[in-house]
Amino acid sequence: MRPFSVFNLTDLSVGLADLFTKRHAALTSTKAGVGQEDVLVFQRNAIDALPKALVGGKPMSEELASKDDEHDGFGTGLWHMTEAYFRVQNLPPHIVDAARRIREAFIPTLGALQESYADEAAAANARKEELGKLEADLKLFQIAGGGTLYDWAAVFVAAGQDLSVLLSKRADVNAATRKNAQVLRSETVGILNDLRRAIAREAKRNPALAADIDAQIFGYLDTLEEQRIAAHRASKAERGKSSTNEG
């Protein structure tokens, strides 16, 4: 019976959820399990209260980059769509004027898409009311496949506002929070290992317990541990392969 060691917070979150549902009856059939139930509930609740970026969510940098790609993609589309109407001669003046108003309101230059996440988010919040003001102008421009430039502008603004939300979430995941999360991880792994040893001792003294009581309680946690070990080995092998290729 090898002690748990490599769980991350995501493993502990899903493992404890399983322990208190599918495996709860087996856990509380032991005195040790009953004695540690409140402690494990406390640990589970503390883990689940952590920012999602630390427990099962996408890394915050990845979320921000993905949302910025969406924002910049639609912003670039808006710029090029309006640019086309500036380049073609003899178009109806009201169409060209509408394109100019859209350009000035939403994407004056492509360089604006190189600003920081914070600046892009602030600009999106300022542009929100322009959607209503320029709705008629935006709907003059049809998009192949359905919809109008209004739809692109709406996504562009919404993606910028989402950047603001994500930046706020990132601020919540500060260094102190990360440190506390790692302490919580270590504590919980230690509690599970202590509990497993206590149940093993209890099983030797109590023949009424199921012969496979350890597997009934810790089977899923064992699976998560094995998967995490395998993932670490694969990652290490990949890094070694990359180092060899670079050499």
Image (cartoon, rainbow, N blue to C red):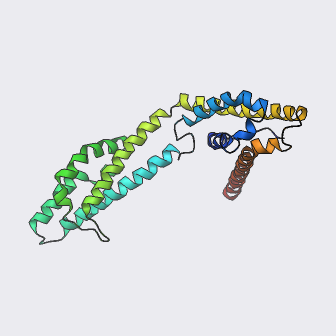
The residue at 25%/64% (across/down) is 148
Please identify the quarter of the rendering in which residue 34 is found: top right
In the picture, the quarter occupied by the C terminus is bottom right
Of residues 94 and 35, the one nearer the viewer is 35
Of residues 55 and 13, the one nearer the viewer is 13
Give coordinates of residue 58: x percent, y percent: 53, 47
Give coordinates of residue 21: x percent, y percent: 65, 42
Please identify the quarter of the rendering in which residue 48 is found: top right
Direction from residue 140 to residue 218 in the image, left or right: right
137 up-or-down from 8: above or below = below
The residue at 45%/52% (across/down) is 66
Give coordinates of residue 71: x percent, y percent: 36, 53
218 up-or-down from 85: above or below = above
In the picture, the quarter occupied by the N terminus is top right
Give coordinates of residue 179: x percent, y percent: 59, 30
The residue at 42%/39% (across/down) is 167
